[in-house]
Amino acid sequence: MVKIPKEQRRYCPTCDEHTDQTVKEATNQSASPWSKKHRKRQRKIDNGYGSFPFEDPSHLARGKSNPTSSKHDLQFSCKECGKSWKPRNQPRAAKFEIER
Ligand SMILES: [Zn+2]
């Protein structure tokens, strides 16, 4: 179980200093169908090359144990400038909770 506090004092890329920020999980945002990642995936599906893309996560981890955890899409928003940003490395955990 990974618990992170809802309010944190973190580095803000816009303000270029440490400010008070709130965390939320950006779960309801749908992926853009025009992103480069999506277009590449659709091209692979249309062409039908090999066994890509792997829909089954157990197929993705060939020779390894099956992944039980998933990455969480966190979004930090700065209280001073009001802008939000996403960290480059999102946490990976099976159970995840944002504390109040
Ligand atoms: Zn800021």
Image (tube, rainbow, N blue to C red):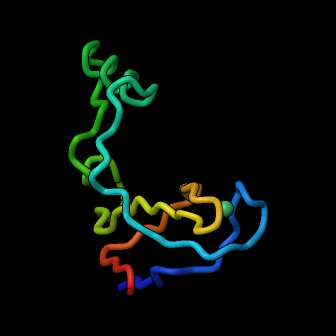
Residue at position x 45%, y 80% from top? Answer: 6
Residue 97, located in which quarter of the rendered image?
bottom left
Image side of residue 69 versus residue 81, left or right = left
Seen from the viewer's position, the closer of residues 58 and 8 is: 8
- Please tell me in which quadrant of the rendered image residue 8 appears: bottom right
For image coordinates 78% across by 61% down, the residue present is 16
Q: Position of residue 76 (x, y in %)?
A: 52, 64
| Image region (quadrant) for ligand 1 | bottom right
Q: Is residue 70 above or below residue 9?
A: above
Q: Residue at image x 43%, y 30%?
A: 37
Say left or right for 99 vs 5.
left
Residue furthest top in the image: 47
Q: Which quadrant of the rendered structure holds the N terminus?
A: bottom left
Between 57 and 21, the one nearer to me in the picture: 21
In the rendered image, residue 43, in percent from the top left (x then y), is placed at 33, 17
Q: Quadrant of the C terminus?
A: bottom left
Q: Is residue 18 left or right of residue 43?
A: right
Q: Nearer the viewer, residue 63 or 15?
A: 15
Q: Residue furthest right?
A: 16
Q: Above or below — where is 30 with respect to 77?
A: above
Picture mark count: 0
- Tell me which residue sits at (46%, 25%) in the image: 36
Q: Position of residue 95 (x, y in %)?
A: 30, 78
The foreground one among 59 and 41 is 41
Residue 12 is situated, as x and y percent measured from the top left of the image, at 68, 63
